[in-house]
Image (spheres, grey):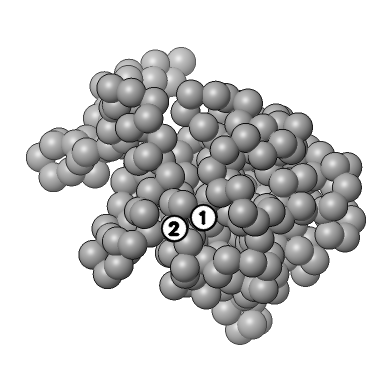
């Protein structure tokens, strides 16, 4: 009993993840505050468009497949998503479409449609997860490859522990998600997790910001790649023990820390080509 109390006391007095991340206990800047919904929306859409640019640079584009959505800051029953057939690497704020939860276009780009399968998946996940303000889904190479095994990832590195007991597997591939049922099934398989591996399909991640969801997607894709590399050797694996995995998850996988994790990628896109903001 004494050890449990001491452990709980240590956790209560421990620095926050952002404080621990900065040397000397100085926290790095996290999600900003805004004076108006308009300012928050513009900032959010710039980060959404930048996330697509990052996905393009990482090679996640696959024809017209793949979508990222983010819930509107003012109207919780609306979300923004990419249009059909615009390459991730070309995405701008003015390309983005705003939909309500019934699939009606209510703002943004009115000149082209969204991806119907994307609308099905993202609507279902936003409805099932009020905390999931952003959702990323793509058919990236290593995610598709690992998904064929229908297995969760092993905790074989510090980084994959960001998904410790926080990712699931959807085993029932139902074809292209034109029907709402497939979107609902994916949302149910995702559950309360940060991510899901969709067998014969791809990957999906969620977050409180598009930055969190996008960083988690890049990390999940790389974790699938590493797992495939490790599996190919046929050698025995050393798995991170549960206690250490849980501590790593607690320190590194909170929403603000994951927001910060994405900022180097965002700033790179901003430095290379800020046209995504238009």
Residue sitting farthest toward the bottom: 233
User: What residue sits 54% from the left and 43% below the top?
Assistant: 108
Q: Height in image: 138 above or below 4?
A: below
User: What residue sits 56% from the left and 49% below the top?
Assistant: 109
Label 1: few (<14), some or many (≥20) within 10 Å? many
Using the rendered image of the protein, determine whether residue 123 is visible from the camera's viewpoint.
Answer: yes
Per the image, the residue denoted by label 1 is 95
Q: Is residue 25 rendered to the left or right of residue 77? A: left
Residue 63: quadrant of the picture? bottom right
User: What residue sits 28% from the left and 22% below the top?
Assistant: 35
As helix, strand or loop, the secondary structure at mark 1 comes to: helix
C-alpha separation, residue under disc 1 versus residue under disc 2: 5 Å
As helix, strand or loop, the secondary structure at mark 2 comes to: loop
Per the image, the residue denoted by label 2 is 92
Callouts 1 and 2 close, C-beta under 8 Å: yes
- Residue closest to the eye, 40 or 200: 40
User: What residue sits 43% from the left and 64% below the top?
Assistant: 54
Using the rendered image of the protein, determine whether residue 134 is visible from the camera's viewpoint.
Answer: no
């Amino acid at each position: 009993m004494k050890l449990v109390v001491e452990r709980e006391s240590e956790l209560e007095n421990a620095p926050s993840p952002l404080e621990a991340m900065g040397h000397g206990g100085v926290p790095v800047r996290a999600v900003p505050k805004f004076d108006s919904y308009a300012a928050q929306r513009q900032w959010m859409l710039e980060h959404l468009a930048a996330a697509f640019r990052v996905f393009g640079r990482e090679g996640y584009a696959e024809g017209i497949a793949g979508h990222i959505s983010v819930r509107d800051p003012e109207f919780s029953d609306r979300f923004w998503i990419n249009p059909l057939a615009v390459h991730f690497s070309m995405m701008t704020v003015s390309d983005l479409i705003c939909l309500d939860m019934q699939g009606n276009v209510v703002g943004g780009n009115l000149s082209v449609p969204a991806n119907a399968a994307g609308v099905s998946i993202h609507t279902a996940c936003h409805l099932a997860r009020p905390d999931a303000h952003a959702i990323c889904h793509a058919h990236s190479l290593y995610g598709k490859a690992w998904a064929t095994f229908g297995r969760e990832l092993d905790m074989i590195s510090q980084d994959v522990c960001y998904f410790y007991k926080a990712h699931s597997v959807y085993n029932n591939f139902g074809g292209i998600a034109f029907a709402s049922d497939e979107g609902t099934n994916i949302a149910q398989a995702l559950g309360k997790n940060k991510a899901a591996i969709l067998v014969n399909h791809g990957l999906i991640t969620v977050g409180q910001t598009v930055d969190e969801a996008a960083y988690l997607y890049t990390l999940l894709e790389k974790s699938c790649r590493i797992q495939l590399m490790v599996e190919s050797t046929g050698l025995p694996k050393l798995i991170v023990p549960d206690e250490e995995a849980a501590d790593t998850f607690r320190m590194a996988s909170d929403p603000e820390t994951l927001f910060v994790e994405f900022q180097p990628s965002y700033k790179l896109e901003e430095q290379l080509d800020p046209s995504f903001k238009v």
